[in-house]
Image (cartoon, rainbow, N blue to C red):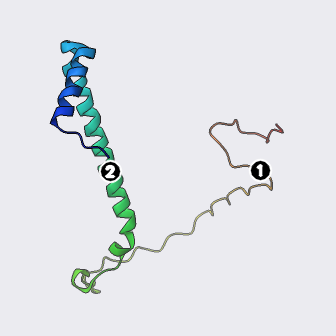
Amino acid sequence: MPQIGPAEILVILLVALLVFGPKRLPEIGRQVGRGMRELKRFQDTVKGELDEVLHFHEDDTPTPSSAEPSISAGDAPPALPAAEPGPTPAPAPQARPGSRPPSRFRAPGPPSNN
């Protein structure tokens, strides 16, 4: 990949000055800076998410030095009272063979034969 030195940067700035003019050049520089900042933020976010996924199982294994102390019977909260028997909830409707799950893009009703 070719290297860009100070002479090349100066030529690029002179061409940008001639093309855009002295009034729009600071605005374009700010826009380029915002774009670079957003790109950097996006790269950091993606890198953080990938690191989190790749090191997910490493965080799950507790080490003896970081293990939490166990709770004794005296420290435990009191048990919840037994639930009173009440009406049983209705069973969930069963899906019919060949039916599709509801979609927010389709009106509910029988499937259409398109």
Q: Is residue 53 above or below residue 71?
A: above
Q: CA distance from mark 2 to mark 1?
A: 40 Å
Residue at the image position 28 percent from the left and 16 percent from the top: 19
Residue at the image position 26 percent from the left and 30 percent from the top: 32
- Amino acid bearing label 1: Ser
Q: Secondary structure at mark 1?
A: loop
Residue at the image position 23 percent from the left and 15 percent from the top: 18
State which mark lies toward you, 2 or 1: 2
Q: Looking at the rendered structure, which numbered label has been put on residue 108? A: none
Residue at the image position 67 percent from the left and 45 percent from the top: 102
Q: On the picture, is 100 further left or further right than 6?
A: right
- Amino acid bearing label 2: Thr
Badge 2 density bin: few <14, some 14–19, many ≥20, Cα 10 Å: few
Where residue 77 sits: x, y (%)?
A: 31, 76
Q: Looking at the rendered structure, which numbered label has been put on residue 99? A: 1
Q: Is residue 76 above or below residue 25?
A: below
